[in-house]
């Protein structure tokens, strides 16, 4: 499938990309229309929110979950979750993946010779996920947007609920240079007459989402801890954080129902909002398809929140020494990470290992993370992904940027393995090794830890 990785000038296929994806799905028999779906987009938190929704639904139902990118293996992008007998959250097995490749291969070859051209890597994997979920007879599938919304390959589904977690500046070279332009693109997943749940906060973005919902006759729920200026058409759903520590969070939720003392296993205040969005999605499902969501009990919601696990998001991989992985790769995500570290581990000396994908807002990311660092080791990565040849800034370049905002000792290492070994030296009980800046770096470290 490496042959279908797009060249740099075609990483975001635009309108043709959606038409091509629609044609691909048509040739496969439109499997994505054979089960109910939930569509989850946004700048940050969409993967976490999708996984939390799936974890709750899986307490009673057979659930498909399609997320991206993967950390170690492409199989991670396609899961079927079920709790009918025992808790399971399985990546698609290699054998099933290979069968799907063989099944979809001739159709891809057929399209390659047509006016549509060959589908991209992401389009092929998304199509495989949709087909796999049909074969697995899932009751419902939770689908994370890859990038943007309007022209994303996943936007061929007809969801019952669309989620836009938040809107910030990321992928600006493709989606636009302002949050308003990005919001317009992300609002493209809103379909006529559906339910919409969002965590957006900016007044201008709220207006865009509200106007889109009005035009599409879609009902909107906005999630916030604080009051927001919203239209009479929208519903404001609140939550209250009661406790946050290294074991997770406890919060109250105020929606159609009030749920007290919900326990979330994920770390960080930002994950509580993602969880509140997920609970609201479950509530809206109960309005749309009573035969499905009404059967989910309060205990199902509590269990789903308590059991959810997301690798690479404030993931503790060692306690002695304390080592945490987090794939924060834009200023907004890094701000949330820094806030969580300061709140949960206020007395720890942070020794950071950082690599940042080339083209990302390195200065903005460093501005957020460096003030809490006592020491920094910059490193690099280079690998082939569905975006093609993917590589980081050189450590020397990041050091130059870092010196503008930090007086902490700065070093560099030629690989993630060398950086990790260097960080482990002279580490005491007061230290926290934080590996961050890119999900690709997190993936490289997880590969090391598996060996």
Image: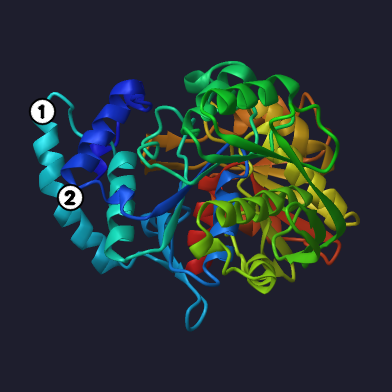
Q: Position of residue 162 (x, y in %)?
A: 53, 41
Q: Secondary structure at mark 2?
A: helix
Q: Residue 390's x, y, as percent?
A: 42, 36
Q: Residue at x 50, y 53 (%)?
A: 444
- Residue 76 is labelled as none
Q: Which of 370 and 418 lies nearest the eye of the viewer?
A: 370
Q: Is residue 46 left or right of residue 372?
A: left
Dot 1 alpha-carbon crowd within 10 angstroms: few under 14, some 14 to 19, many 20 or more: few
The residue beneath circle 2 is 104
Q: Would you name the residue on which mark 1 appears?
A: 114
Splitting the image into 4 quarters, where does residue 225 fall? top right
Could one spot residue 65 in this view of the protein? no
Q: Residue at x 10, y 46 (%)?
A: 106
The vertical placement of 106 against 447, above or below, is: above
Query: Element under label 1?
Result: loop
Q: Is residue 371 left or right of residue 177?
A: right
44 shown above or below 435: above
Residue density around tag 2, few if under 14, some if 14–19, many if 20 or more, within 10 Å: some
Spatial separation of the CA atoms under disc 1 and disc 2: 16 Å
Q: Tell whether 51 sits left or right of 29.
A: right
Which is nearer the eye, 137 or 129?
A: 137
Q: From what the image shows, is residue 363 above or below residue 247?
A: above
Residue at the (15%, 48%) spot, across then down:
105
Return the residue found at the far right: 347
């Amino acid at each position: 499938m490496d042959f279908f990785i797009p060249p740099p000038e075609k990483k975001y296929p635009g309108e043709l990309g959606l038409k091509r994806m629609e044609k691909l799905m048509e040739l496969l028999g439109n499997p994505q229309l054979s089960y109910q779906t939930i569509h989850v987009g946004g700048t940050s938190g969409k993967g976490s929110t999708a996984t939390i929704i799936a974890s709750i639904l899986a307490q009673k139902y057979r659930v498909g979950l399609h997320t991206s990118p993967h950390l170690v293996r492409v199989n991670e992008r396609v899961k079927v979750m079920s709790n009918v007998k025992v808790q399971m959250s399985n990546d698609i097995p290699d054998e099933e993946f290979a069968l799907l490749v063989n099944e979809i291969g001739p159709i891809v070859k057929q399209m390659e010779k047509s006016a549509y051209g060959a589908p991209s890597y992401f389009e092929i994997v998304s199509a495989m996920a949709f087909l796999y979920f049909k074969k697995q007879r899932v009751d419902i599938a939770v689908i994370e947007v890859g990038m943007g919304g309007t022209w994303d390959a996943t936007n061929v589904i007809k969801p019952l609920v669309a989620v836009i977690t938040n809107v910030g500046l990321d992928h600006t070279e493709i989606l636009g240079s302002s949050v308003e332009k990005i919001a317009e693109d992300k609002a493209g997943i809103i379909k006529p007459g559906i339910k919409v749940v969002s965590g957006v906060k900016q007044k201008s973005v709220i207006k865009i989402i509200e106007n889109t919902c009005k035009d599409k006759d879609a009902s909107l729920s906005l999630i916030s801890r604080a009051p927001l200026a919203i239209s009479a058409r929208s519903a404001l759903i609140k939550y209250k954080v009661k406790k946050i520590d290294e074991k997770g969070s406890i919060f109250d939720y105020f929606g159609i129902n009030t749920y007290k003392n919900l326990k979330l296993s994920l770390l960080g205040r930002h994950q509580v909002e993602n969880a509140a969005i997920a609970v609201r999605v479950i509530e809206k499902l109960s309005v749309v398809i009573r035969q499905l969501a009404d059967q989910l009990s309060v205990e199902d919601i509590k269990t789903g929140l308590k059991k959810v696990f997301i690798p690479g998001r404030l993931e503790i991989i060692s306690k002695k020494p304390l080592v945490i992985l987090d794939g924060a790769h834009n200023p907004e995500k890094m701000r949330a990470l820094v806030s969580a570290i300061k709140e949960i581990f206020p007395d720890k000396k942070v020794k950071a290992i950082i690599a940042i994908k080339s083209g990302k807002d390195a200065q903005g990311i460093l501005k957020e993370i460096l003030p809490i660092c006592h020491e920094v080791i910059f490193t690099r990565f280079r690998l082939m992904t569905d975006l093609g040849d993917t590589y980081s800034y050189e450590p020397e370049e990041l050091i130059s940027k870092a010196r503008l905002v930090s007086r902490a000792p700065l070093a560099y290492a030629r690989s993630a393995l060398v950086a990790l070994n260097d960080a482990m030296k002279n580490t005491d009980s007061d230290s926290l090794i934080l590996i961050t800046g890119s999900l690709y770096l997190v993936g490289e470290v997880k590969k090391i830890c598996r060996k």
